[in-house]
Image (spheres, rainbow, N blue to C red):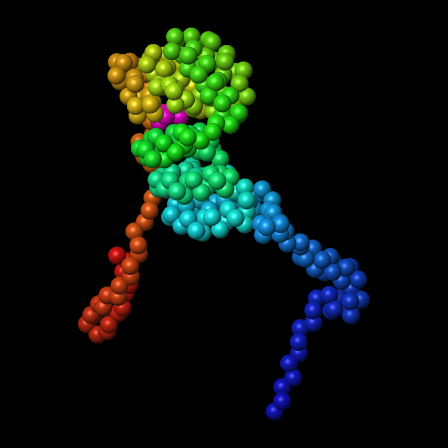
Amino acid sequence: MMLKMKMRPEPTFAAKRNSLQDIWCFTELVRESEVEEPPTKMLRGGGCELDAEQLMEKANEAIEHAKWERWDEMFEIFDVYPGCQNMRPEFRRWAAIHQVIFAGNVETLKRMVDSGANPGLLTRDKETPLQVAEQLGQSEVVEYLNTLEVSADSAALLQQAHQVIDAAKEGKWDETFELLKGFSNPEQVVNTRPSATWTSVLHQAAFHGDIEVLRRLLEDYKANVKLLTKDGKTALQIAESAGKEAAIKYLEACVPSIQLEDDFVKYPEQVWSTVLFVGPSAYATAYSQI
């Protein structure tokens, strides 16, 4: 016996056939709205042009590859989507260049810089690649970064940082904060320690033990409490060596004691094994992750 299957008519066809003009017009409008232009267009040389949000997604993918030291995959993204090597999603502490520095891979770092990566790109904590390398004790990376030419913007930043630090050395806090108010990037200035100096403005405040100055630097100018001196000391350690008890207690309360981010975490290779459990009347197979 033959069965005839009745096909469900397409919405626009059914609406038009039944003279439902309003519905037909609506469904046609919906159909047209579903046809969108591709989000990318090819550039000369094979690259793709994306909007800022899409480019940030590609930057995030590249950072994830960098975390796992998948350099080929990282550079593939940089080649197709130029510009994303200098982007860092807000939720990320580090960009790709900082991950390369964490790995201590100088050759990969050189290749990144040659392809347009900014050696002055800041972390979420307002740290430069050089400062990250110094904190991690990556001596070869530090040596390489110190050989790079300083841009005009970076030179201006270093000059501003020197001015603020010099005022802080003498405890001239009114002058220090007046200088910061006059800069367009005061937070970046506060978190800059020129390689020629031993301390930043925060370390000078810790040495003097002025609680109000420390508070203003940390709260108003987002000073990085983990920023190191040239010989690897934090502001807390400076206060301890200077015997500034009030500053010690204040900075102890500001120093994070728990690392909740996974920027540095690498997980061991996952191996799966089959374990056989013998019950009274049946066998059960389970998989355990070791």
Q: Which x, y percent locates residue 2? A: 62, 89
Which is more toward the observer, 1 or 102? 102
* Residue 150, placed above or below residue 40: above
Residue lying farthest bottom? 1
Which is more toward the observer, 184 or 128? 128
> Residue, x 70% and y 66% (percent of image)?
11
Q: Is residue 268 left or right of residue 87?
A: left
Is residue 253 in view?
no
Q: Quadrant of residue 98?
A: top left
> Residue, x 60% and y 44% (percent of image)?
51
Q: Is residue 224 magenta?
A: yes
Q: Quadrant of residue 249?
A: top left
Provide the residue span drawn in magenta: 223-227
Q: Is residue 130 magenta?
A: no
> Residue, x 41% and y 48% (percent of image)?
71
> Residue, x 23% and y 68% (percent of image)?
276
